Amino acid sequence: MSKTQSLSFARVPHPSPTPADKRAELLKNPGFGRVFSDHMVTIRYSDSRGWHDARIEPRAPISMDPAAAVLHYAQEIFEGLKAYRTADGGATLFRPEENARRFQRSAERLAMPVLPEKAFLDACDLLVSTDRAWIPDGDGSLYLRPFMFATEVFLGVKPSSDYLFMVIASSVGAYFKTDAPAVSVWVSTDYTRAAPGGTGVAKCGGNYAASLLAQAEATRHGCDQVVFLDAKEQRWVEELGGMNVFFIFDDGSLSTPPLGGTILPGITRSSLITLAKDKGLEIREERYSIDQWRSDAGTGRLREAFACGTAAVVTPIGTVRSKDGEFRIGNGGSGAKTEELKATLVGIQRGRTPDPYGWIHKVF
Ligand code: PLP
Ligand code: COI
């Protein structure tokens, strides 16, 4: 298949889809990532045939040879994006082209084949339209998880010759379980997430495997998420385990750590930078040290901080804990600017306010 040629998807409908009453029960309080829709999309790749065998079929376990390369060398990448139900009964995605492009960049970094943008978008659209009944009402959404992994049966260390690309969908509510107005974060000083020249910029499973021990440490200290510092100096705030971070100051300006190869270039992050600029706010992409964070929280120069990402949306950070003790930001809850930015973003994402940016992709 060439870059512009489109794949046609074979359609294998589910013989016994989840009954409506059972689905309604599951959608009442789905949490995050535990409730799955009825179908999945798969596309295969081999060096000899290119992209082929695209299909949508009933969601089911997949079988793999125990020597499949991904099980040994973790050649795997993924994406995360949400489908929203609109007031007119339709469904939309938020900037899915950006996910498709980041997926391509992740593939390049992991020495994997590059899936054409159109195939990525068609796969997402097809799954959303097929499983539209799984998009929750209200504040929920249908979280799409496109991913790709190496399937060649070979134990030598080299890029695989075969891959499987898949999209699954999960009906979700809020990512964080807490009812608190803000989350708490643990600053990891024993572990780092990404080093210069490494894979921090890519969305590959290995980055998350490497973050789990630090996340477990955060949980042990009563925190919702882990904050990683840079690997070189252990000084500069980079990002959280699964989200980017923003700071809001007493002069009304904002800052967020700059992308430099070790931070995931979040689509929510880039959207919020645009929204902040268009609101006339000063926004800097600049390094911010953990010592400065502590000191600014103490003096009141720092008024608010928040985490952001597809799963987290915009989540205020109230408490920061580390081996050196704990500090609070503002009153430890949310702040007015965080709430304003969140409302603008969510309003556009859910089609409640006009989208002057062309960010909304209509599925149907
Ligand atoms: N940083 C990390 C490590 C993430 O896993 C995510 C989530 O995808 C983000 C940042 C935010 O990215 P996005 O806004 O594109 O979801
Ligand atoms: C997302 O926000 O899409 C992610 O991949 C982050 C993860 C914490 C669920």
Image: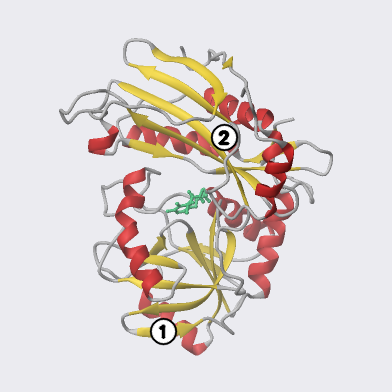
Q: Is mark 2 within 8 Å of ligand 1?
A: no
**Residue drawn at x 57%, y 16% as measured from the top left:** 9
What SS does tag 2 mark? Answer: helix
Q: Position of residue 42 (x, y in %)?
A: 48, 24
Q: Position of residue 322 (x, y in %)?
A: 35, 78
User: Residue at coordinates 42% horizontally, 50% vertically from top-left?
Assistant: 264
Residue 110, located in which quarter of the rendered image? top left
Dot 1: element:
strand
From the viewer's perspective, is residue 284 above or below residue 122?
A: below
Label 1 packing within 10 angstroms: few (<14), some (14-19), many (20+):
some
- Residue that extends furthest to the bottom in the rendered view of this protein: 299
Image: 25 above or below 71: below
- Report which residue position mark 1 lands on: 326
Instruction: Please name the residue that numbered disc 2 is placed on.
Output: 97
The residue lying furthest to the left in this view is 156
Please report whichever mark, 1 or 2, sits nearer to the chain's N-terminal start.
2
Lateral position of residue 36 relative to residue 219, left or right: right
Viewer-nearest of discs 1 and 2: 1
Closer to the camera in the image, 323 or 28: 28
Q: Nearer the viewer, residue 137 or 115?
A: 137
Q: Residue at x 53, y 19 (%)?
A: 55
What amino acid is at disc 1?
Glu
Q: Nearer the viewer, residue 220 or 332?
A: 220
For the C terminus, the image quarter is: top right
Q: Please provide percent x and percent y for residue 19.
A: 70, 35
Give the label on residue 159, or none: none
Residue 181 occupies which quadrant of the picture? bottom right
Q: Is residue 211 visible?
A: yes
Q: CA distance from mark 1 to mark 2?
A: 40 Å
- Position of 355 with respect to 108 (left or right) is right
Residue type, mark 2 in image: Glu
Estimate the x, y position of residue 49 in percent, counting from the top left.
Answer: 37, 10
